[in-house]
Image (cartoon, rainbow, N blue to C red):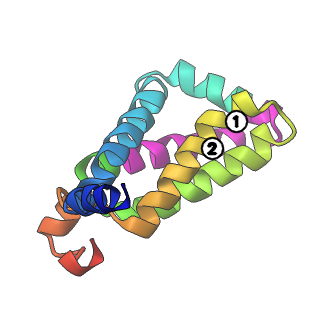
Amino acid sequence: MIYFLQRFNRSLARFAAYASLPIRLLLGWHLVYGVQDNVLSYTRMLEFRDFLLQNGFPVPLLSAYVSVYAQLLGGICYLAGLFTRAAAVLMIVNFLVALLMVHRGGPYVAAFPALVMLSGSVFLLLNGPGRPSADRRLGLESPQQE
């Protein structure tokens, strides 16, 4: 049994360089989808500003713009696999702030989306974008990092 598990594990290892791809695509799509209404509608941006005001954010309109455009840029970077590690740092900061300012003391279920975004971003920071990425094509990630 152990022999077959070892063979199975070795056969999957050749695909490890692609492990980041589904995570990048899911997180990137979710980021872009989640903020597109704020980008396209000033009314929605003002609603987000009011939400941030209720949660004690300083300069809520500026905070809204920074968060929305950081998520939009981060999502686009994740989707393309471009500047992935830098985008991951940006998203880690964004979602740590969200967890501390908005979700602290709240129910786990409400914090779960932010926790997924945070943990996925940590994964991408530590593992990089993987083989199919603009970072790899531009030489920002070397094959040894996969």
In the rendered image, the residue lying farthest to the left is 137
What type of secondary structure mainly makes up the magenta span?
A: helix
Residue in the image at 61% along x and 40% along y: 114
Q: The N terminus is located in which quarter?
A: bottom left
In the rendered image, the residue lying farthest to the right is 105
- Residue 47 horizontal side relative to residue 74, left or right: right
Badge 1 is on which residue?
A: 111
40 lies above or below 111: above
Residue in the image at 52% along x and 60% along y: 122
Task: Report the amino acid beneath label 1.
Answer: Ala
Badge 2 is on which residue?
A: 115
136 lies above or below 37: below
Q: Nearer the viewer, residue 27 or 67?
A: 27
Disc 2 packing (10 Å; few <14; some 14–19; many ≥20): some
Q: Which residues are magenta?
A: 52-75
Find numbered disc 2 in the image and state the secondary structure of the residue it sits on.
Answer: helix
98 lies above or below 16: above
Regarding residue 39, the answer to whether it shows in the image is: no
Give the percent coordinates (x, y) of residue 115.
63, 44
Residue 9 inside the magenta-drawn segment: no
- Residue 70 horizontal side relative to residue 111, left or right: left
Q: Nearer the viewer, residue 62 or 82?
A: 82
Residue in the image at 24% along x and 55% along y: 18
Q: Nearer the viewer, residue 46 or 16?
A: 16
106 lies above or below 117: above
Give the percent coordinates (x, y) of residue 17.
24, 62
Residue in the image at 41% along x and 41% along y: 27
Disc 1 packing (10 Å; few <14; some 14–19; many ≥20): some
Residue 57 inside the magenta-drawn segment: yes
Find numbered disc 1 in the image and state the secondary structure of the residue it sits on.
Answer: helix
Labels 2 and 1 touching (C-beta < 8 A): yes
Task: Report the amino acid beneath label 2.
Answer: Leu
